[in-house]
Amino acid sequence: MSIHTKLQQLGITLPPVAVPAAAYLPYVQTGKLVFLSGHIAKKEGKPWVGQLGKTMGTEEGKAAARAIAIDLLGTLQAACQANGGDLNRVARIVKVMSLVNSTPDFTEQHLVTNGASELFAEIFGDKGAHARSAFGVAQIPLGACVEIELIAELA
């Protein structure tokens, strides 16, 4: 099954690549690896502001991480298209790094990050299984609750 068909079945429409808010590129490719810059959580087109353990719980954080995964897929699709292909060129999701805006006593960053990891596995199957880091941080740009970056390998 093509990735496009899988996305349609899940009711997911990929967004266009967001314009960087600072001095960086949305992605950089070297060899077969594509490095995607960190994407912050957005809700209704605006930063999804919040702090896990204070203003929001694990399930809402997980939903934010899933929303970021969809944005990341939009950027990854653009990288694939720049190489004359589509998301079917993804050989593997290699690494996910997640930053969770959380209180010092919040310890479920890994569960929040599952929102992204589970979606990648659902879309790419075994190729979506990846190495991962999930950190709790004091703040994220624009007060966003979660930021995630990704490394993928293209075929």
Image (cartoon, rainbow, N blue to C red):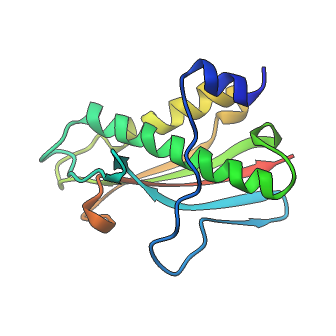
Give x and y (percent) for residue 110: 39, 40
User: Left of 32 or right of it: where is 131?
Assistant: left
Give x and y (percent) for residue 46: 32, 54
Q: Residue at the spot x=28%, y=31% of the render?
A: 59
Q: Residue at the spot x=63%, y=27% of the render?
A: 7
Between 79 and 155, the one lying in front of the other is 79
Q: Indicate the quadrant where residue 108 lies.
A: top left
- Above or below, 59 against 94 in this view is above
- Above or below, 137 against 81 in this view is below
Q: Residue at the spot x=52%, y=81% of the render?
A: 23
User: Left of 63 or right of it: where is 75?
Assistant: right
User: Left of 132 or right of it: where is 91?
Assistant: right
Q: Indicate the quadrant where residue 99 lies.
A: bottom left
Q: Residue at the spot x=82%, y=42% of the render?
A: 89
Quadrant where the N terminus sits is top right
- Above or below, 81 against 122 in this view is below
Q: Indicate the quadrant where residue 34 lies.
A: bottom right
Give x and y (percent) for residue 132: 54, 47
Give x and y (percent) for residue 71: 52, 47
